[in-house]
Image (spheres, rainbow, N blue to C red):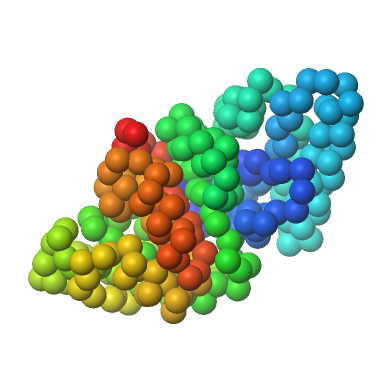
Amino acid sequence: MVANNDIGYERVLVPVGDKSDPNMLTQLSSILVDPRRGAVRFTHVTTDRSFVGSQENWRTGSESVAESQHTLREEGIESTGTIRTASSALDGILEEFEEYDADAILIGWTDKDSVSNLVDRLLRKANCDVIVFSADRDPIDTDSILVPVVVPPDENRLQMLAIMSQRTEASVTFAYIAGDEGSEADGRELLDRSVERLGEYGVQAETQLASSVGPVEKLGELSADHDIMVIGTSRGWWLRQSLFGRKTDKIASEAQCSILMHKWQGEVPPDN
């Protein structure tokens, strides 16, 4: 992420499929990229080496990339597009990341096992911020962002939250669920500290303190009043044993809004 007085990522890499963008990554990239000097690269990776299959994947991938580029150019944001053939989707994305020197990768989150496995490996291998998004609605229309905390948010996450809030004019609410993990007094102290730290980036956040023996289910209830819930990959959340295991699947199934998982560069996700 860039310095405090800057307003976005400079080079965002967005892998796209051969169909529509169900997770609205193009719209999300327009929020997170620095509009003054930033750019977005859309890339489609094909692993089909047969002539017929590669030709079809190339065609549909090119159409998807061109459509995303067109959307951003209408908003005055610089964008480029590439089609890459690789031995695997992960290898292709990482090769493109190295070539582009991206400071963030945006990728969609679905319930398909193959996609979950790809994202899990990407979170571990990409040496940059990785943002995984599951869209419930267009992120540009975000009015309210929910941020569950169990430790003070890292400054990289605070910067991202500030960018999202300032671009969409959305409110930010830090939430703490008291229960097995800590007391209400611990929660209040953490919430106040989180609000203070986000305030340094020009955003005044709200807080929500609740008690429950089922924190994931409780967050599902709270999410109904928000448009996006932002979670981390390890210490910033209860994901201590897996990224795309039962807990994250449960979060996704319980949530009544879009979900954004953010891993900042240098953050080490937990081992499976």
Q: Is residue 21 above or below residue 126?
A: below
Q: Quadrant of the C terminus?
A: top left
Residue at image x 50%, y 69%? Answer: 257
Query: Does residue 2 appear to the left or right of 191 in the view shown?
Result: right
Residue at image x 78%, y 20%? Answer: 49
Query: Does residue 165 appear to the left or right of 42 in the view shown?
Result: left
Seen from the viewer's position, the closer of residues 233 and 100 is 233
Residue 41: name its quadrant: top right
Image location of residue 59, percent across then percent down: 87, 37
Residue 69 visible, this angle = no
Q: Is residue 70 above or below residue 121?
A: below
Residue 241 visible, this angle = yes
Q: Tag count in the figure? A: 0
Q: Is residue 190 above or below residue 269?
A: below
Image location of residue 4, percent across then percent down: 40, 54
Residue at image x 84%, y 28%? Answer: 53
Seen from the viewer's position, the closer of residues 186 and 246 is 246
Image location of residue 180, percent across then percent down: 15, 60
Image location of residue 271, percent across then percent down: 32, 33
Q: Is residue 190 above or below residue 133?
A: below
Residue at image x 70%, y 32%? Answer: 45
